[in-house]
Image: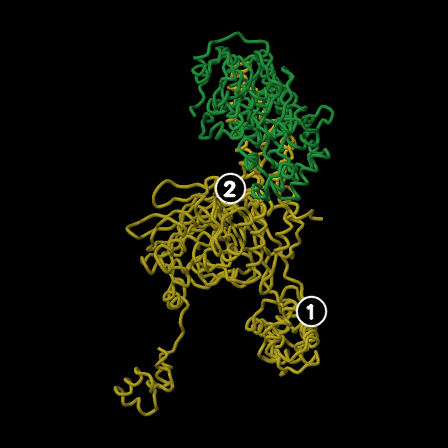
Amino acid sequence: MATRKKTPAGTTPANKAVSEETATEAPREIGERDRVTLQKITDLAFSALAEVRRGKNPALSIPVRALSNVSFDQEAGLIRLGESRQSRNFFHLKQAKLFMQTFLIAEHCKKLIEAGATTSIRDIYYGAKHSVAGTKENTFEEQAESDPIIEDLEVTIDALREELHLRAENRGAMVGPMTIRDTGDTIDLRRMGSGGWSIPSIVEDNRIEFMKTEAEYILFIEKGAVWARLNEDRFWQKNNCMLLHGSGMAARGTRRLLRRMHEELKLPLYVLTDNDPWGFYIYSVIKQGSINLAYESMRMAVPQARFLGLMSSDAEKFNLQANVSMALKDEDSARIEQLMRYDWFASKRWQEELALMKKTQKKYELEALSSRGIRFITEEYIPQKLRGRRGDSWLD
Amino acid sequence: MNSIKTPDGAADPMTTEALIQDPEALKPAGRRASAEAMGAKQRDISVSEFFTKNRHLLGFDNPAKALLTTIKEAVDNALDACEEAGILPTLEVSVEEVSDGRYRVRVEDNGPGIVKEQIPKIFAKLLYGSKFHRLRQSRGQQGIGISAAGMYGHLTTGKPVVVVSKIGRGRPAWRVEVRIDSRTNEPKQLNDKNDTVTWEKDHGTSVEIELMGLYRGGRTSVDAYLEQTVVANPHLELTYKPPKGAPVHFPRVSDLLPPEAQEIKPHPHGVELGMLIKILHESGKRHVAQTLMEEFSRVTHAVAEELCKRAGIDPNALAARVDAMKIEALHAAMVASNAALPPIKKFASKVARSDGNLREEVMEEGTGFSTPLADLVIRKAGLEPTLKAKAVTPMMVEKLYQSLHESQVKILPPPANCIVPVGEALVMEGLRRRFKGEFFTSHTRPPAVYRGNPFVVEAGVAFGGTLSREDSADVLRFANRVPLLYQPRACAIHEAVLKVDWKSYGLQQRKGELPVGPLAIFVHLASVWVPFTSEAKEAVAHYDEVVREIRLALMECGRKLGTWVKAQQAERWETQRKTLFEKYIVELAASIHSITKVSEESVKKDFEAALPNHVRIALPPVEGGVPSAGGAVEAGGEEIPAEADASAAESTAPVEARPSDRPPEMSDDGEGSPFEDVTPGNTRQLVLKMRPKSGRK
């Protein structure tokens, strides 16, 4: 929160916080990819400067990240960002601060790239936070303010978060018959114990390399608890598959990793989630992308992903007792209605599934399968599902 | 002392006591003195004796007030004289402390001077003067003031009034030392009747009075009085030598002498019975109609005949011979024409609620109706005067109303050329001379009438600048250009100020209190006969017509002020906006510098240079009083007809609602006005409130 210190003109700006943080990491040559990103940031600043020199109101043109500006590309099976953009002007009472904040984040990202450092979005919040000169006001009051600004910057200059050298917390885990190189360390994912390899937020090929694998497919599970069950049963060993979980909604790193494995290793992807609208949506995000990150669908979505369950129709098929179900809550019902209206849930089978859930007013957690026996999920449910027919055992 | 006269004195302890002590009084029961004994003691009371005992009636109730009143009377006289003679007044007022509590007041003017013979009477005879017997706008009215001041001076110090007066170049400057004989109310010159002094002035008068007084500051001080006099008299050049400190000079701000006030005859609406009797009796050999035409304004031959007809008088009868009953009828006809008939609805509801009969009701309504006239009017409507008012049907009320209406002789209101207001421009000049404000405005109402007396109300306001923000508004009251300093709460002007809703003009005001803020309010009532509450001329009486006119004038000023205040607020918001951008420019410049390596200073300059293109700082003009965009306000003000209902005028006042306008370059996200974010919580409401409902036309 220290007042911004003036950097003497002409000298290389070296933010103290950043340089300290990067002290552990060796400085490196700026790669081609980083050079492009740096150029984008510099261009943005120069264009604002050019506008203001002509007496104009400098503006950032930010793609709108909302349902109104996304469309479902049926052919590619992707949610794509539309063309509409909103203008963020500096000479505007409501936008002046946001405009300033955007450049503050841009400045910090540029320093990170130049220093070859990566930082968490929380770090950058602290790094960019200080009091506005001569006031008691802070540049950012809370991280909830800086996070959307980061996303704004990403879409505005069309750079990925990783390209801005920003990362989020590690989230999700992976085990399976594969060896990878993680920033120089060779890791055998068969020897990860009960916790698995924690998936970082940046999994680009300059950090994570796939060495060799015997895996035949990827199984993504919504919940860590169920994943732990499967890991304990060495499911991945018996079935030759990569086993991942996302601790709920798959984070960017997990999604990008799934995409890379699917694309580079040609592995089919199966997704196992709870039987509720939230589970369904987790699947749809992995498969088609999300509204908020629609601009990244291209590099994160796996349109060929298959939904293994839990389906509403599974209850009868696998003889799940009524007592393991849960009643739908109001918010669940509302969410079902929303999903039914999304273009990417428009297929007949999905509409049937949603309608059935709505009709029975029941939802099931993956753990409900344990009511049929502790290894029911690994020995009967999944194998049977994998063998079954499309639209019946699994859904697109 | 009432108890002594009580006829059934037995109940009175004092009388009982008297009975015991004075056996003689026992005979004629309860009497203490015989008519003869009492008659021996009865004699004339000289007006001067009366005022010696009742000095408070003239404004000499305490030393501080006495000093002020003395100066005031002398200044009033000087100004009246100058104006009547068409001379731009140059006055010198000096107050000198002779000894503790003893002051010598000297007021010198450049007026026409006074002829030698008149000097003693003017300065040492109460109720002597030229102004009482005419109806004409002047500061002095009764011819009491200056003589009373001289009398007070003599009473407290034993010193006579010293007058020096010269009526022209080459004429002697007479010096007169005079005092009043309070028994006879006659002047007594103390020096040689042919005393002269050398005086370099061509003409003028100087009066010097020594008196026991108290010089102090504050709202009712001599200084305050003179400062205010200067406000209402922009054509006055005044030098004031206070008892302590350096002389103060107020240069003339206007070389225009106010136009000469025309003397008018009384208007029939305002005449009192006694005055009518006097006029008729002193009419010599003239006929009634002729007398009425010659003695009253706006009485044409037709009107005179109509009045006589109603009173049952032959217009060609000798006026002096008309009997008392008929005069009363004539008077009733004259004032009935002024019967301020309420609207029929109000009249009907009043009648319906009345406990009396129709005669009583009508006599109350038609001020001055005599019983026979009331009966006549009622019978004309086909009704009986003794009918209970409650029993009257709406149809009957309508007929009665019609009859009342017809009973009125239509007489034109008195001519207005007898009133000389200060004028809007000069009121503002005067206020500027007195206050270092930021905004000035004024408004002069068209002439109006109370009790047959025409009057004009002017109001002005000074706002902002060095005026105190925390205190209540400063209310400057004037009657015929004379400041009124005492008894503000008893004054109609004060009442009218309270009746205005200043909050709607962006000021603070608690209910029933003066508005608070950097505001000075000027109200001037000009009339041929100002209705004072007392002879001390301290407060204006509460005539509805007067209060209403003052209120309307103030509201007009308030509207203009409100517009300006709002424009100021808008400007403040703009400044806030500017500050907001300026602080972010500093941040932004640092970031852009860091990214582009363009020097921080240069980036900052570029942004600051572009700032004015996007933030509008519009300064409303201080001069002239009305912001440029509020030109409509001025035009609008003039469009409002004089008789417009106050509330209607208020609601149609066009007000610039700039804060709600959206500067086009700021509004591209459809999120509403960029003002909304920074404006204080209440302003939006304020803006909405002040927005004109629709176009005026």
Q: Residues within 10 Å of mark 1 (few under 14, many from 20)?
A: some
Which mark is first along the chain, 2 or 1? 1
Residue topped by disc 1: B303
Q: Amino acid at mark 2?
A: Arg
Residue annotated with mark 2: B432
Percent position of residue B211, x then y: 34, 55
**In the depicted view, which residue is nearer to us: B499 or A148?**
A148
State the SS at label 1: helix
Query: Left or right of B539: which side holds B43?
Result: left
Q: Position of residue A290 (x, y in %)?
A: 63, 28
Q: How is the image coloured?
A: by chain
Q: Is residue B588 visible?
A: no
Q: Determine if residue B296 is in view.
A: yes
User: Relative to residue A24, is residue B298 depicted above or below?
Assistant: below
From the viewer's side, name the closer residue of B459 and B73: B459
Whether discs 1 and 2 lie on one chain: the answer is yes
Of circles 1 and 2, which is in front? 2
Where is the N terminus of chain B found, in terms of image quarters? Answer: bottom left
Left of B537 or right of it: where is B303? right
> Which chain is mark 2 on?
B
Q: Sort mark 2 into few (<14), some (14-19) or many (20+) by Cα contacts within 10 Å.
A: some
Q: Secondary structure at mark 2?
A: helix
The three-letter amino acid code for the residue at tag 1 is Val
> Residue, x 49% and y 19% (percent of image)?
A192
Q: Residue at x 48, y 25 (%)?
A: A122
What residue is at 58 percent from the left and 61 percent from the top?
B545
Residue placed most toward the observer, A62 or B254: A62
Tell me the green chain. Answer: A
- The answer to which quarter of the image holds residue B309 is bottom right
Q: In this rendered view, identify the residue nearer to me: A298 or B365.
A: A298
* Image colour assigned to chain B: yellow
